[in-house]
Image: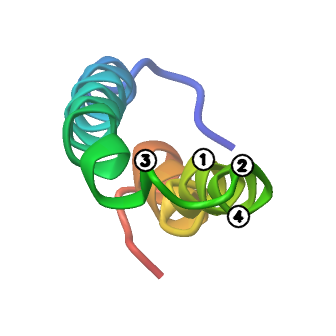
């Protein structure tokens, strides 16, 4: 159990926010031009998938913030 503060947590939170901002801006910039003419239901499903994709690396990232190891 960690008893002292570590630099990885604030750096990790800022990095996560920056990565999500960039990811969101890229999706907001390019996705409507690609899927804008598709049926609404298909667009909805794609945006749901894109909204969940960022969760895939989150476990390892949070593990690194706590332990300093990626695995």
Give the residue at mark 1: 51
Of mark 4 and mark 3, the one earlier in the sequence is 3
Q: Locate residue 44 relative to residue 26 in the image: left or right.
A: right
| Cα separation between marks 4 and 1 | 14 Å
Secondary structure category for the residue under label 2: helix
Q: Locate residue 31 relative to residue 38 in the image: left or right.
A: left
| Cα separation between marks 4 and 3 | 10 Å
Q: Residues within 10 Å of mark 2 (few under 14, many from 20)?
A: few
| Cα separation between marks 2 and 4 | 5 Å
Quadrant for residue 32, please give it. Answer: top left
Secondary structure category for the residue under label 4: helix
The residue shown at (35%, 26%) is: 6
| Cα separation between marks 3 and 1 | 17 Å
Give the residue at mark 4: 42
Q: Which mark is residue 36?
A: 3
Q: Residues within 10 Å of mark 3 (few under 14, many from 20)?
A: few
Of mark 1 and mark 2, the one earlier in the sequence is 2
The residue shown at (34%, 50%) is: 31
Circles 3 and 2 in contact, beta carbons < 8 Å: no
Of mark 3 and mark 1, the one earlier in the sequence is 3
Give the residue at mark 2: 40
Circles 2 and 4 in contact, beta carbons < 8 Å: yes
Q: Locate residue 10 relative to residue 53 in the image: left or right.
A: left
Secondary structure category for the residue under label 1: helix
As drawn, 45 above or below 15? below
């Amino acid at each position: 159990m960690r008893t002292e503060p570590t630099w990885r947590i604030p750096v990790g939170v800022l990095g996560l926010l920056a990565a999500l901002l960039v990811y969101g801006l890229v999706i907001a910039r390019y996705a409507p031009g690609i899927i804008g003419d598709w049926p609404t239901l298909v667009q909805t499903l794609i945006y749901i998938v894109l909204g969940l994709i960022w969760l895939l690396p989150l476990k390892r990232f949070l593990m690194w913030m706590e332990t300093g190891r990626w695995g």
